[in-house]
Image (cartoon, grey):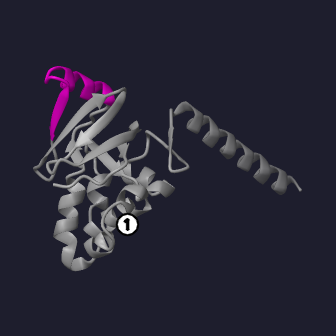
Amino acid sequence: MKKLRTLMLAAASLLMLHTANAQKEKTVEVGGAPMYPSKNIVENAVNSKDHTTLVAAVKAAGLVETLQGPGPFTVFAPTNAAFDRLPAGTVESLVKPENKAKLTGILTYHVVAGKLDSKTLEKWAAKNNGTAELKTVAGGKLWVMKKDGKWWVKDEKGGVAEITIPNVYQSNGVIHVIDHVLMP
C-alpha cells in the first residue's frame, strides 16, 4: 500500500511539474497542438495535425536533421490544405526518391536563415517601402508585406500566401503558418 501511495504521489508530482513548465512557456496552438518555444521546429511540427504533409515531405527530402539543428531558421510552413491546392498528383510525385532534389528545393525555398518574427519583418518592410525582401536557404527570394492588417508572402512566380498564424516561436527559430505552397 505504501509503494502504491508513493508511486501515485510521484506521478502526481511529475504531472504538476509538467503542467507548471507548460504554463511557463507561452505556447501557440497549431493544428490542435501546443507549440512549445523550448522545442525545435521538427519536434513541434510533428504534433500539428495541419502539417502532416509538410512533415512527410521534410522526411522524404532528408531535412529532418537540418531543421532540428541550431539554426536559427524562419520557416513559412504550408498547411495540408495548402498542399491540397497544388495540382492533383504533385505531392505524390514530389515525395518519390527520384524527385528528392526538386522537393528539397521547394522546401528550402520556404526557409530563411535567422529568426524573423513579424516585428522584425515589419521593421525591414518599413525600410523598403512596405515590403521586406528575404533570401531563402534555397537561394531564391521571397517578399513579405502587410496589407489590410494581414501578412502576405509572395514568391518568385507571383504566387501569394497569407500568413495565417505568425510568430510560432521555436528553440531554433520561428514558424509562420501559410495557406499556399510557395514556388521558386
Q: Is residue 6 visible?
A: yes
Residue 113 in the image, given as x and y percentages of width and height: 20, 42
Residue beneath the point at 84% across and 51% down: 5
| Residue nearest the observer in this picture, 132 or 7 | 132
Q: Is residue 73 magenta?
A: no
| Residue nearest the observer in this picture, 128 or 1 | 128
Q: Is residue 125 magenta?
A: yes
Residue 159 in the image, given as x and y percentages of width and height: 22, 49
In what quadrant of the picture does the N terminus appear? bottom right
- Vertical comparison of 96 with 122: above or below: below
Q: Is residue 174 visible?
A: no
Residue that extends furthest to the right in the rendered view of this protein:
1
Q: Which residue is mark 1?
A: 56
Residue beneath the point at 15% across and 20% down: 127
- Vertical comparison of 122 with 80: above or below: above
Q: Secondary structure at mark 1?
A: helix
In what quadrant of the picture does the C terminus appear? bottom left
Residue 147: quarter of image? top left
Residue 11 in the image, given as x and y percentages of width and height: 72, 50
Residue 117 in the image, given as x and y percentages of width and height: 31, 32
Residue stretch rendered in magenta on the structure? 118-134
| Residue nearest the observer in this picture, 81 or 39 | 81
Crowd tier of the residue under label 1, counting other residues whose Cα lies within 10 Å: few below 14, some 14–19, many 20 or above = some
- Vertical comparison of 75 with 118: above or below: below
Residue 73: quarter of image? top left
Q: Count up the numbered dots.
A: 1
Residue that extends furthest to the left in the rendered view of this protein:
139
In the image, 166: left or right of 181? Answer: right
Residue beneath the point at 14% across and 48% down: 156
**Residue type, mark 1 in image:** Ala
